[in-house]
């Protein structure tokens, strides 16, 4: 007998089964007791006993071990799937790749099966996750629109095909419903523009949970800390607009506090980047078009139901002008000749008014207005006064600034005479 036939690979369960069957053959226990111990039927135990009596220890090993399953995917289909992954979906995660294979190519494969294939081919590597720090857990809000987490994600969304973009994102805390829009930077106008788009779609939320970015919060320290001399905290343009809309701003002390929006950005940096790659998006406008079709599918897959019924989003009141609220408003002094200096530009107010101070409103669509309270003032752009050039004296060495007596002065000739007398 060859050496290979003497070695049997048996699992712990099979070894235990053989020991019980061996006791049946030695008539220590009967077949019914063996069936109760092995949790098998009497008929199955009789079949195993006959096999062990005829074949020995190998009789307890399943006959299908080492054989290919009847439902396995053929090698031809597997080679096609791996080829499609190399050509179009390289870098995609197994779950996202399986979804795209079914959506774009009509090939259905389980994500775990694809994961094993990719690991065997060296196209996917399992990364170990760090053990998370222990933090206090906060339950989700119970109603839709009760709290919305907001943040901006700076990332190379276009993978070098275009400029770096910022995804201004809003995720509902109760349902994980996400809305976002791409901008070229994170600032006051992108924050107001994205908030306006969110309000037009969903309504005015009760509160917004966000970080302490200088766009959202004035981080200057108080000059005086003792009451009543403590300075009032000045609101940013975004904070002022939210206050006028009745939105409560909640500032997070750490990124982990608003972890829901941080985690969804990590998901988008995997899934959305691949969608932009497949669409070959190169500009901010093209990226927003891809995002418009991507978000409904994403929300359908990941959105959950709120604990309580009811939507706490408020509709926009027709009596308020949301375009004026969501504008950059700057207060300036109105000079005696009714001129205003704003952003190094001069404006002449044409409307007669006795106002001492006016407000310059810069709207999101690029328009501008000058207002005094509720009155809109007419104006025109003018050239500012010419500034006279100031002659700056060059710096002189302090030694050059010494007083030099003129010719014939006692301080010049007297010292010479005194020197000559001392020498004599």
Image (cartoon, rainbow, N blue to C red):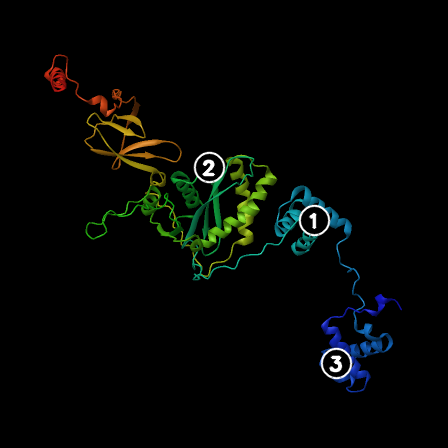
Question: Disc 3, disc 2: CB below 8 Å?
Answer: no
The local crowd at label 2, few if under 14, some if 14 to 19, many if 20 or more residues have their Cα within 10 Å, is some
> Which quadrant would residue 321 be assigned to in this image?
top left
| Classed neighbour count for the residue bearing mark 1: other residues with Cα under 10 Å, few (<14), some (14–19), many (≥20) | some
Q: Mark 2 points at which residue?
A: 184
Q: What element carries label 1?
A: loop
Numbered disc 2: secondary structure: loop
- What crowding class fits label 3: few (fewer than 14 Cα within 10 Å), some (14-19), or many (20 or more)? some
Q: Position of residue 309 (x, y in %)?
A: 45, 59
Q: Which mark is residue 35?
A: 3
Callout in the foreground (2, 1) = 2
Q: Is residue 29 left or right of residue 94?
A: right
Residue at 75% across, 81% down: 35
Horizontally, residue 238 falls left or right of residue 135, namely left
Q: Position of residue 250 (x, y in %)?
A: 36, 52
Q: Name the residue under label 1.
A: 107
- Mark positioned earlier in the residue sequence (3 or 2): 3
Residue 37 located left or right of residue 263 = right
Q: Is mark 3 on a helix, strand or loop?
A: helix
Looking at this view, name the residue that lies furthest to the front: 424
């Amino acid at each position: 007998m060859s050496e290979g036939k003497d070695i049997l690979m048996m699992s712990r369960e099979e070894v235990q089964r053989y020991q019980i069957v061996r006791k049946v053959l030695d008539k220590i226990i009967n077949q019914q007791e063996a069936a109760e111990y092995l949790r098998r039927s009497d008929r199955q135990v009789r079949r195993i006993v006959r096999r062990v009596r005829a074949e020995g220890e190998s009789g307890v090993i399943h006959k299908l071990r080492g054989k290919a399953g009847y439902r396995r995917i053929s090698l031809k289909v597997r080679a096609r799937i791996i080829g499609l992954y190399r050509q179009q979906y390289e870098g995609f995660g197994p779950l996202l790749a399986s979804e795209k294979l079914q959506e774009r190519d009509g090939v259905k494969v389980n994500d775990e099966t694809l994961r094993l294939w990719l690991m065997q081919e060296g196209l996917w590597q399992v990364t170990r996750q760090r053990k998370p720090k222990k933090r206090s857990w906060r339950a989700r809000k119970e109603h839709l629109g009760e709290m919305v987490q907001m943040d901006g994600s700076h990332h190379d969304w276009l993978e070098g095909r275009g400029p770096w973009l910022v995804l201004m994102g809003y995720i509902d805390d109760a349902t994980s419903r996400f809305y976002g829009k791409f901008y070229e930077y994170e600032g006051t106008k992108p924050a107001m523009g994205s908030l306006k788009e969110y309000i037009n779609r969903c309504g005015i939320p009760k509160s917004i949970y966000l970080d302490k970015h200088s766009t959202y919060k004035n981080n200057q320290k108080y000059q005086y800390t003792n009451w009543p001399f403590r300075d009032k905290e000045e609101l940013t343009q975004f904070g002022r607009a939210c206050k006028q809309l009745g939105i409560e701003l909640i500032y997070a002390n750490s990124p982990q506090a608003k972890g829901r929006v941080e985690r969804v950005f990590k998901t988008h940096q995997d899934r959305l980047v691949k969608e932009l790659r497949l669409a070959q998006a190169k500009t901010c406008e093209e990226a927003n078009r891809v995002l418009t079709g991507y978000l409904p599918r994403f929300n359908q897959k990941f959105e959950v139901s709120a604990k309580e019924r009811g939507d706490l989003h408020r509709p926009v009141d027709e009596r308020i002008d949301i375009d004026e609220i969501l504008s950059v408003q700057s207060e300036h002094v109105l000079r005696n000749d009714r001129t205003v200096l704003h952003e190094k530009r001069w404006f002449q107010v044409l409307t007669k008014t006795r106002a001492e101070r006016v407000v310059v409103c810069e709207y999101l669509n690029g328009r501008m207005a000058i207002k005094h309270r509720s009155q809109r003032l007419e104006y025109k752009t003018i050239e500012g006064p010419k500034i006279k050039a100031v002659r700056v004296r060059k710096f002189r060495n302090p030694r050059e600034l010494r007083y030099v007596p003129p010719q014939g002065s006692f301080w010049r000739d007297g010292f010479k005479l005194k020197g000559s007398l001392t020498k004599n």
